Amino acid sequence: MKTIKLVVAALVMTISSATVAQNRPMHEVYSMMVFNFVKYVQWPTNDNSKEFIIGVVGNNDIYNTLNTWYSGKAKGNKTYVIKNFKNASEVTDCQVVFIDRSKSGDFVAVNDKVKGKGTLVVTDRSDLGMKGSCINFKTVDDKLKFELNQHAIEASNLKVSSSLTSMAILI
């Protein structure tokens, strides 16, 4: 049964990254991918808050989509809360923060602000995976893929399932 779940998960992520990108606006694809990443990451257990916060820096379309699709829904004993940040100075504690390509200049400030706090940092610019983003979107052969920086994941006190790792470009 576990093997079947892993295969289904792999298919969902592959379809999201290849086929869906051709049929949906990119902000919807990014929103689906960010939300799906959450399913494969384990956060530190010392967080007693009732909210699971996904922050978006710099892309109103992604923020609006995540907010419409997921805000208020349950994640275990927590509730999804989607926050929109205009820049790094506004970023507060989040479990996930997505930094849009248009705000990639804020990456270092955001990453420094959340370092070691159990935050999955997701970016969308080719060099940010190597600079310390946990997950970075990348286009390869006209298909949306993602890089996973294992060192950044460990530095963020997160654990990633092997099914997500197997779908990623490891850096």
Image (tube, helix red, strand yellow):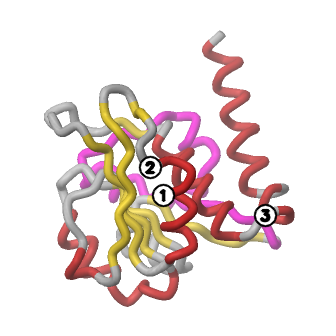
Which three-letter amino acid code belongs to the residue tagged 3? Arg
Q: Residues within 10 Å of mark 2 (few under 14, many from 20)?
A: some
- The three-letter amino acid code for the residue at tag 1 is Asn
Q: Amino acid at mark 2?
A: Ser
| Mark 1 Cα-neighbour bin, 10 Å: few <14, some 14–19, many ≥20 | some
Q: Which residues are magenta?
A: 142-171
Callout in the foreground (2, 3)? 2
Is 160 inside the magenta-drawn segment? yes
Residue under numbered circle 2: 71
Reply above or below: 47 against 19.
above
Residue at 42%, 40% in the rendered image: 41
Residue 138 picture quarter: bottom right
Between circles 1 and 3, the one closer to the viewer is 1
Residue on which disc 1 sits: 67
**Relative to the observer, which residue lies in front, 69 or 122?**
69
**Above or below, 98 relative to 49:** below
Residue 96 drawn at (x, y percent)? 36, 55
